[in-house]
Image (tube, rainbow, N blue to C red):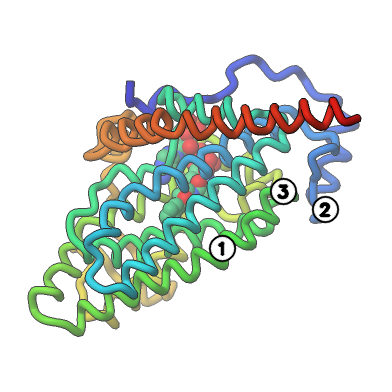
Amino acid sequence: MYAQSLNAKDLTPVAAEDATKLAVFQARIDAEEKIEPNDWMPEQYRRTLIRQISQHAHSEVIGMQPEGNWVTRAPTLKRKAQLIAKIQDEAGHGLYLYSAAETLGVSREELYEQLLSGRAKYSSIFNYATLNYADMGAVGWLVDGAAIMNQIPLCRCSYGPYARAMILICKEESFHQRQGYDIMLAMCRGTPEQRAMAQDALNRFWWPSLMMFGPHDSNSTHSELSLRWKIKRFSNDGLRQKFLDATVPQAHYLGLSIPDPDLRLNGATGHWEHGPIDWDEFARVLAGDGPCNRQRMKHRRQSEADGSWVREAAADYAAKHRRAAERAA
Ligand code: BYC
């Protein structure tokens, strides 16, 4: 079962919160204080964070796959080393984020189970195929570019462990974005064939990158509460706009054209405006029917199974040392 339509939301009803505690909590948020694991927090705040942080962690883990596809075929030693470093960073981001989620009282095993059973979501973008090496450029430039736009404000998230994890993650994402743009630049300065590959990669990754920011604000179920609690600092559309304004000039500098006939600069506002996003495609990908959903989950489950002997050996080794320490005590 590969659908992401079923998700790992905790559906047990949330009991009414104590009004006084809620008011004190909101005052702390409004005063920009960080909420820490042992502080009182509304149950809905805890659940929202577990949902968002774990989806984010799963995205980092699944996000290694489209790039892993190109490690052996990256054109030079430098490009291979960069790609391996980037993939390794993403594994690290996943681990930081699972740790941040654990501070909210959920176990890592539970979160893994939600991903492997298909109940948890991960970012829609990782269900698209990486068909040629220029896709490594487009992923770095656009996907990591969109990720940074979304994640820099998360460094100011009201929940301390998530906000602190995001600081290192954003620094590394910034390197990822630059290496992606560097690939695009090299290809756009290369042969006509390389230039065509870069344009093709942009054509395929443009719209899925805009979708990464989530549904329009009018259809975003969680934004209102997440903004009030300063989990999110900007709305989905607000961040999509920032991404558009930053990225369109970068595409022009590369000499590439954005695959959107309705794209226009609004002279009055100074902002770029995009054409309609295909939300049916977004819904299909979230429902498990994107180009690579099945492959991504199959691969993830296989890796989990292949690695089980390592986990068992590590657990046995830890138990042996625990027993030895108990005997010596
Ligand atoms: N894909 O009410 P909304 C990365 C879901 S970057 C799948 O607006 P929210 C990386 C949403 O979960 C990518 N699902 O939700 C980069 C909700 O469903 P549920 C990861 C999506 O949470 C490079 C429903 O739609 N980044 O890791 O307020 C290399 C309604 O949406 C998507 C993060 O996770 C989507 N694109 O806002 C490697 C950043 N968009 O849960 C790795 C942290 C929406 O009700 N996350 N949905 O079933 C966030 O900032 C927010 O969760 C979002 C969505 C802006 C993504």
> Which residue has dot 3 on it?
161
| Horizontal side, residue 278 vs residue 272: left or right | left
**Closest to the observer, 99 or 74:** 74
Foreground: 153 or 92?
A: 92
Residue 72 x %, y %? 25, 59
How far apart, in angstroms, are the residues tagged by discs 2 and 3? 13 Å
- How busy is the neighbourhood of tag 3: few (under 14 within 10 Å), some, or many (20 plus)? many
Q: Would you place residue 243 above or below residue 193 in this image? A: above
> In the rendered image of this protein, does residue 65 appear above or below residue 151?
above
Q: Which residue is rendered at x = 64% and y = 32% of the image?
A: 317
Residue type at mark 2 is Glu
State which quarter of the image contains the N terminus. top left
Disc on the earlier residue, 3 or 1: 3
Q: Check disc 1 and give the amino acid type.
A: Cys
Q: Which mark is residue 33?
A: 2
Say what secondary structure mark 1 lies in.
helix
Q: Which mark is residue 53?
A: none
Along the line of sight, which residue is nearer the eye, 142 or 282? 142
Q: Residue at x 83, y 40 (%)?
A: 25
For residue 169, what is the image quadrant? bottom right
Residue in the image at 36% along x and 64% along y: 83
- Quadrant where the image shows the C terminus: top right
Q: Residue at x 57, y 67 (%)?
A: 171
Q: Is residue 77 left or right of residue 133?
A: right
The local secondary structure at tag 3 comes to helix
User: What is the three-letter code of the residue carrying label 3?
Assistant: Pro
Q: Nearer the viewer, mark 2 or mark 3?
A: 3
Tell me residue 234's x, y (percent). Answer: 57, 55
Q: Which residue is mark 1?
A: 170
Q: Earlier in the sequence, mark 1 or mark 2?
A: 2
Q: Distance between the Cα atoms at labels 3 and 1?
A: 14 Å
